[in-house]
Amino acid sequence: MTVMVDDNPAPTASPVEVPGSMRMREAMSRFAPAGALFVGVVVLWEVVGRIFHVPEFVLPAPSSILRVLVTRQVNLGYAAWVTAQEVVWGFLLSGAIGAAVALVIARFATFGRALYPLVVLFQNVPKVALAPLFILWFGFDLAPKVVLIVVIAFFPVAINMLVGLQTVDSNLVALMRSVGASRNEILWRIQIPNSLPYLMAGLKVAITLAVIGAIVGEFAGAQAGLGYMIQFASTQMQTSLVFAALVEVSVLGMLFYYAIEWIERRYIDWMPHTA
Amino acid sequence: MSAVPNAAALRRLSADTGAPSTAALAPAHISARGVCVDFTVAGRVTRVLDDVSLSVPKGGFVSLIGPSGCGKSTLLKVLAGLLPPTLGDVSVAGVAPIEAVRQRRIGIVFQEATLLPWKNALDNVALLMEVAHSGRTNDEIRDRAIDMLRLVGLDGAEAKRPAQLSGGMRQRVSIARALALDPEVLMMDEPFGALDAITREEMSEFLLEIWERTKKTIVLVTHSIDEAAFLSREVNVMASNPARIIEALPIDLPYPRNEDSYSAPEFARATARLRRLLKEGHRQAMAA
């Protein structure tokens, strides 16, 4: 999860200003293979569907999914808005709680020894099975989804950040102690900055889990959202709408993921990036 | 100040006792007497250091050399106040090492530069000053950090991050950081061990320059015979099984030393003697 491969030699790490057109061309060449493959698969899907006359309620052709995406864009847009809110709130809370758990375990050794096994134990509860309980306790709106996301997604944040807090150079800590630095100063000046790249790795896992959590939460009981829409449409045999909602879920997930990666590149620039 | 101990007397002493002591000859800035360190691993007690004594005069330059695992780094940790000895007395500048550390009399340099990758050279040098609560203002800390970088020949590199610096430059930053608190003693644990041969020799010459300019007392752990002989006034040769100092060899090579010192007959004599001592120690360890 946190394997960093340093493939660029150290002294050349200075940022070189690249002109916009060149950066554009670079981006093109980076995404071109993925784009070509995507187009190829979609075309194949369309062609196979037409040749074999696959019924629309079994596997709709890309063209009819696209049609639904356009004609039902208002409904889909609203559903995406509802789901996005669940994802964002759930993700932010997961990040905050995960980071807090890591900090508490790292800072207060005894309490950490008490807390850590319980966190691991809780991690092994199948949390999807908790969804109906959360609906029972918190209703059909935002709250149960956010809670479900948090219990699913805080763990990778906590574990990754904890690793970052604990893998500090012991000699450096000895130096800090030798000049009278307090535990809090060492935490603040060394451990927390050191943990940020690890935290970001955890957040990237958490955001994908947050999307899954939101959809599962809506499956368990909801009145709106993409997950609700998928479930509703599949009972109505509106398979094109199911796929259209899936497309929106995927796009949503990707947007969130790349937003986090952007923040990482922008603010944590001392770690070598893996392309 | 009789900083240079009488070489003949020293040799006689170390030949007599096996454990050298220059304490009688010069006022000791750092002294260790009968130091033992035991480590307990899985319930078994291992003696990592056995009855080690040494003495370093003020402004002296002493090396600890020996095979890997002979306890030379452990001895340095004891002298630097990072590890309490199981037995024995240690004093640095007249007080216990822990107290000397508290009074900021000891600066430490490790094999790895241990810099913060997210901070530039200037902020890395300032780090320990900032947490030391020494009463300096931020401006004073900044000015001193700039001075220290200039002292180690890194003026102009203030804004560079460790990733933008070479291994030798990183180690210079680390030395600047140690000097920033103006310690009397510099404890260095294989500071150039991770550098290539050429950079290593350059850094040796650089360290001598720093030593002559700042008049610090330096204790250096190394496993390079040439480095030990080139730099030090006295080399403490260590052997393992049990871990101890087998000889304190004075190096009669005049300062200031430079590239030419490597071809001086005194240098050849010293390195030959060191080589023989290390081999002897190795043979004994194998036999034991």
Image: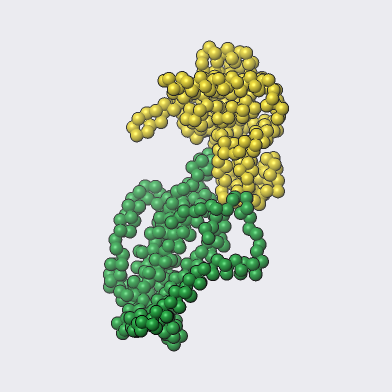
Chain colours: A green, B yellow
Report whether A168 appears left or right of A240: right
> Residue A100 appears at what percent x and percent y?
42, 58
Q: Quadrant of residue B263?
A: top right
> Residue B208 appears at what percent x and percent y?
67, 31
Which of B35/B109 is in front?
B109
Which of B210/A175 is in front?
B210
> Residue A206 appears at what percent x and percent y?
42, 63
- Residue that sits furthest to the bottom in the current view: A71
A79 w.r.t. B89: above or below: below
Residue B132 visible somewhere in the drawing: no
Residue drawn at point x = 33 percent, y = 50 percent = A114
A272 w.r.t. B207: above or below: below
Residue drawn at point x = 50 percent, y = 65 percent = A260
B96 w.r.t. A187: above or below: above
Counting labels gives: 0
Q: Quadrant of residue B257?
A: top right
Residue B199 visible somewhere in the drawing: yes
A15 w.r.t. B90: above or below: below
Report whether A86 appears left or right of B151: left
The quadrant in which the C terminus of chain B is found is top left
Residue drawn at point x = 42 percent, y = 71 percent = A87
> Residue A76 appears at what percent x and percent y?
42, 82
Report whether A154 appears left or right of B72: left
Residue drawn at point x = 29 percent, y = 63 percent = A126
The quadrant in which the N terminus of chain B is found is top right
